[in-house]
Each structure stands twice: as structure tokens, then as C-alpha cells.
Amino acid sequence: MAILELVPDVYSVGSIDWNRTLFDAFIGLSKGTSYNSHFIHGSEKTALINAVDPEKEEELITHLIKLKVSHIDYLIALHTEQDHAGSIPMLLELFPAATIICTQSAKELLFHHLGVDPERCKVIADGEQLSLGNKTLEFMATPWVHWPDTMLAYCIEDKTLFSCDLFGSHYATSDLFLTDFAEGEVLAKRYFAEIMMPFRASILEYLDRLAAKEIEIIAPSHGPCIKPASHIVSLYRTWASDETENLVVIPYVSMHGSVKRMVYYLSDILIEHGISVQMYDLTTADTGDIAASLVDARTLVLGVPTMLFGPHPLAASLAFVANMIRPKTKYLGVIGSYGWGGRTAEILGELTATMQAERLDPVLIQGAPDEQAYDALDALAHVIITKHREN
Ligand code: FEO
């Protein structure tokens, strides 16, 4: 990443990871990512907001050398996950006078994850300010976006919010600011779905607090900066709200064709009654795409064959993920086919135990769908159509 000036005396010194395809050994990245780090040259003090992934620490150091940074007063660790804090131990060696500014939780996590000496940390309180001379940073504790340690930093003079993971996107681009808002929205939504959605309630609270501040620029720790800030803030308000769309998401697996016939039969009825359907074949679908569609979906219907005694592993995995990311989906259905028996519905129920969605009666049939099976699917479709109309 080239060194770019975000606002006067604030420099983007992080790294673009063009070729990363997987995050957390699970989340697929279609457009790489970036680890954004910002150096602030205040009139009295200097600060570095967040570091980078340890794989990219050489790039960060090169940028600091190019900027002729010989002294850092404050290393501001907004969050201790390794993609932002992994190179802090190296920075502490290079800048022995630097003090880490972080939350109490981050201080503990920095020690446990990276062996950082707690004596190097100064804990900052929610709402506390730090003066760099002509620039003042105000901190806002925002636990659970993404870890319990997380905080945001707002530069009062520059009206710039350093938002860490919040408002981010896995989006490698040479543009300092987002220019393609359509592509940016797709990537930010996917990021929200996989990383932020479990924390919707907290996010709404933080959005209310941020509304009291005049924010012109949002500088997240992943992806391009955003100006006007209102663009991503209003998207987050919608995504984090309880509002759903007239959409049924149907991820399915079919081993011998029965489940496929069932899901297509159900989706045809729904579409004919004005409901949008998004169908995913789990043998090829991208989990991030499914997660993004669950940001809006009113209903999730899993199409599942029974394998041995329980749900097909691909469907079980998707159920586990849906349970983990906690979408606002209001209704949850299961349809599928079994050979001789099994506990598919019960196991899926256990895997989705913390989802708030109302459970619809499952339609599980033996073997290939017959007239009775199609009648059951008609009944399920009728329930979904009625419930969607009520909403
Ligand atoms: Fe980008 Fe939670 O780290």
C-alpha cells in the first residue's frame, strides 16, 4: 500500500493483502483485504492507530521509515485480534518509548495473545480524550464489534472516525476512499453478515451514540475509507434493524434428486405468490453469499437429505453457521428426504438452538416425493405466504 494522506498530518501506512482468500481459516475473501493503520503527526505527540497482520509488518515498517517516523508516543490498539495487533510486539521493540493506549480488556488480551507486557499499556476509559496537540482523539468503548476489547477513536478536529472492524469490508483496493459504492456495499454487507451480525443489538446502540458526533470520514481497519460517512451508517442501520424483506433463502443439498425436487417445488409456489427466493446448492455455494442474503431474509428453509442417521454434513454445517451469525430471520423451516429414518429434524433443531426464529413444521419424507409430500409442501408454502403477508 502506498502512503496516502487521509487528512492533513494523518497518513495511511497499512497494507493491502491482495491475494488473501481466506480469513479466520473459514471466511472466503473474493477481493482480498487490507489491514489499515494510520499514523498521526500531531503538533506535540505522535500516534499510530492499529498495526497490521504480522505477515505484513515489514510493509508497515517500510512505510514508517519512508515517512521518517523516528518516534511514536502512542500505539493505539483499538482491538487485539492479530490482523490489527499482531505486529505490536515488533513495534514495541522498535519504539521503546511508545505507550499502548487500549481498553482494560485489550490490555489483558494483548498479554494472553501476544505476550505484551501490561506495563506498556495505558488503559483509556470510554469517552476519555487524548491530546496530540493540534489533534484530539476521543475514545468510545464498543465491546463486541468485534471482540470484548474493541473501541473506536474519533478525531475531533478532523471529524474522522477510526472505526476498527466496524463499517469495514474485506476489499483490497488502491483507492484510499471508496469510489465504487455498489461494489463497496456488496462487500460491506458480506462482512457485516459474517462478522458483525451477531452483535446487531450492540451496533444499534453504538449508532445512536455516534449520531451525536459530526463524522465526515470513516476510516475502518479493513477496506477503503468512506466519505460521506452517512452512506455506510445508514446501511448499518438497515442491516442491524429487525426489519426483514419478503425473501425466503433456501440452501439445500440433494444426493439423489429428491430434495432438489422438493426445494424447486416449494420455491415455485413461493415465487408465484410474490415472494423472492434465493436458492443455494450447498455443494458449490459460497457461505459468505448465503450469510449476506440472511441479512435480509424473513424465512430460511433448509433442504436436507438424511445421511446415515442425521442431516447431511453440508446442511449441518450451514445450520451451525446460521446459528453462529444469528440472522434476524423470523421463520425457520426444514424440508428433506430420508432413507429409513434418522434424527435429522432434532439434530438441526439442536444446531440452531439459539436462533430466535419461529420453527415451522418440518416436511421430511421417505424416499422420493409423492402426492402426499407435495401436499405437505403446499401446506408449508401456504404457512410461509401467510406469515410473510402478516409482516
Ligand atoms: Fe479485523 Fe476482529 O479483526
Image (cartoon, helix red, strand yellow):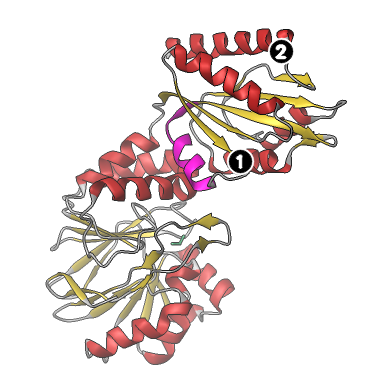
| CB of mark 1 near ligand 1 (< 8 Å) | no
**88 relative position to 228: left or right:** right
Magenta stretch prevailing secondary structure: helix
Residue 303, quarter of the rendered image: top right
Quadrant for ligand 1 reads bottom left
Image: 214 above or below 200: below
Question: Mark 2 vs mark 1: which is more N-terminal?
Answer: 1
Q: Which mark is residue 109?
A: none
**33 relative position to 348: left or right:** left
Does residue 52 appear in the picture of this structure? yes
* Spot occupied by residue 230 in the image (x, y as percentages of width and height): 20, 45
* Local crowd size for mark 2, using a 10 Å CA cut-off: few (<14), some (14–19), many (≥20): some
Quadrant of the frame with the N terminus: bottom left
Q: Secondary structure at mark 1?
A: loop
Kind of residue at disc 1? Leu
Residue 260, quarter of the rendered image: top right
Judge by depth and name the residue closer to the eye, 199 or 181: 181
* Spot occupied by residue 346 in the image (x, y as percentages of width and height): 76, 28
Q: Is residue 288 magenta?
A: yes
Q: Is residue 218 magenta?
A: no
**306 relative position to 245: left or right:** right
Looking at this view, name the residue that lies furthest to the right.
340
Judge by depth and name the residue closer to the eye, 50 or 310: 310
Q: Whole-Å distance between the Cαs marked 2 and 1?
A: 22 Å
Q: Which residues are magenta?
A: 287-298
Identify the residue under disc 1. Answer: 282
Residue at 22%, 86% in the rendered image: 67
Kind of residue at disc 2? Ala
Q: Which mark is residue 373?
A: 2
